[in-house]
Amino acid sequence: MAAKRFLVHGRVQGVGFRWFVGRKAEALRLRGFARNLRDGSVEVVAAGPESALHELAQVLARGPAMARVERVDASEFPHEETLSNNFEIR
């Protein structure tokens, strides 16, 4: 099982982005969270099979209809960090 941290930049707050991500993450059976950051970006941390994380990355790059994603930065998420057993919207 892999874990990734994604920082999504652009017009991604106030457009239902976290809920959009949450529905997709649950459908992919990923665990983790999505939350707004003060700089206007959205942080998404997800853990699960590599194939599901790859699919999530593609979804993040598109976003919901009202969003305008400028870029997505991805990095490994440390395994020593604890994630809940489901996907949370924070």
Image (tube, grey):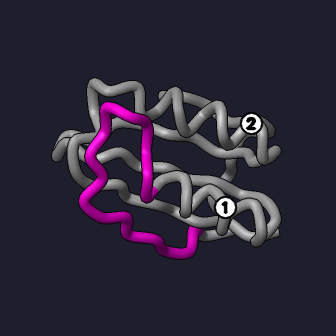
At label 1, the amino acid type is Glu
Specify the quadrant of the image occupied by residue 36: top left
Residue 43 picture location, percent across and down: 41, 49
How packed mark 2 is, by other alpha carbons closer than 10 Å (few <14, some 14-19, many 20 or more), is some
Residue stretch in magenta? 61-77
Residue 26: assigned label: 2
Residue 55: assigned label: 1
Is residue 41 covered in magenta?
no
* Label 1 – label 2 distance at C-alpha: 12 Å
Left or right of residue 11, residue 87 in this image: right
- Residue at image point 50% right, 40% down: 34
Looking at this rendering, what residue extends furthest in the left direction? Answer: 39
- Residue at image point 35% right, 55% down: 8
Residue 5 picture location, percent across and down: 51, 62
Left or right of residue 57, residue 46 in this image: right
At label 2, the amino acid type is Glu
